[in-house]
Image: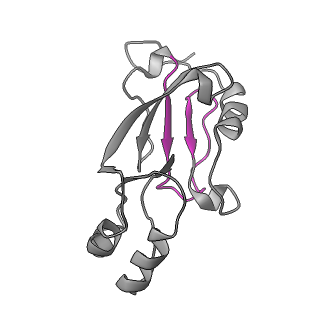
């Protein structure tokens, strides 16, 4: 299962983009990014399982070394999200590795430009998130 968190391509040739996207492996989901709207027709033609602006998913324990994980997926980084105070992660891609990581938020920039232009696996995400500690910024907790 593959989730694309927006800005799928800067390709200008619609036919070539559709052809390339159809060749990608996995059950593909897309969260729209700000650069996707001009190529929406070409992207839509690429056999997506699900499309939207935000997804909330649950990774089952059997797919994550015995540990279930809820994740909020959005193109844009968030400071708070549904159940952020209960260990739910937030993954985003909009910033293209230009935003400083916050060790007090269970969020991560998963844009390919942050990960050597390869997809990010659950084991990689587990390693990153294990180094973080959620510290609330709203009424669910106050930063020190």
Q: How is the image coloured?
A: one colour
Q: Is residue 120 left or right of residue 12?
A: right
Q: Residue 50 at what x, y percent from top left?
A: 33, 49
Q: Quadrant of residue 117?
A: bottom right
Magenta-drawn segment: 87-109
Whether residue 43 is situated above or below residue 3 in the rendered picture? below
Q: Which residue shows up at 45% across the image and 22% down it? A: 84
> Residue at position x 26%, y 73% from top?
41
- As rendered, which of 132 and 57 lies closer to the eye? 57
Residue 45 vs residue 100, the one in the foreground: 45
Q: Is residue 12 above or below residue 79?
A: below
At x 36%, y 39%, the residue is 55
Q: Within the magenta stretch, is there residue 105?
A: yes
Q: Position of residue 92 (x, y in %)?
A: 48, 46
Q: Is residue 18 above or below residue 1?
A: below
Q: Quadrant of residue 35?
A: bottom left
């Amino acid at each position: 299962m593959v989730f694309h968190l927006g800005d799928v391509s800067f390709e200008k040739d619609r036919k070539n983009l559709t052809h390339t996207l159809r060749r990608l492996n996995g059950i593909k989901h897309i969260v729209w990014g700000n650069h996707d709207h001009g190529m929406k027709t070409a992207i839509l033609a690429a056999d997506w399982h699900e499309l939207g602006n935000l997804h909330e998913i649950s990774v089952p324990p059997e797919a994550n070394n015995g540990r279930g994980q809820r994740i909020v997926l959005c193109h844009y980084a968030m400071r708070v999200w549904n159940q952020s105070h209960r260990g739910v992660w937030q993954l985003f891609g909009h910033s293209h590795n230009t935003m400083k990581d916050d060790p007090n938020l269970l969020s991560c920039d998963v844009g390919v430009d942050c990960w050597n232009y390869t997809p990010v696996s659950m084991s990689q995400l587990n390693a990153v998130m294990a180094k973080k500690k959620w510290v609330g910024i709203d009424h669910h907790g106050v930063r020190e």
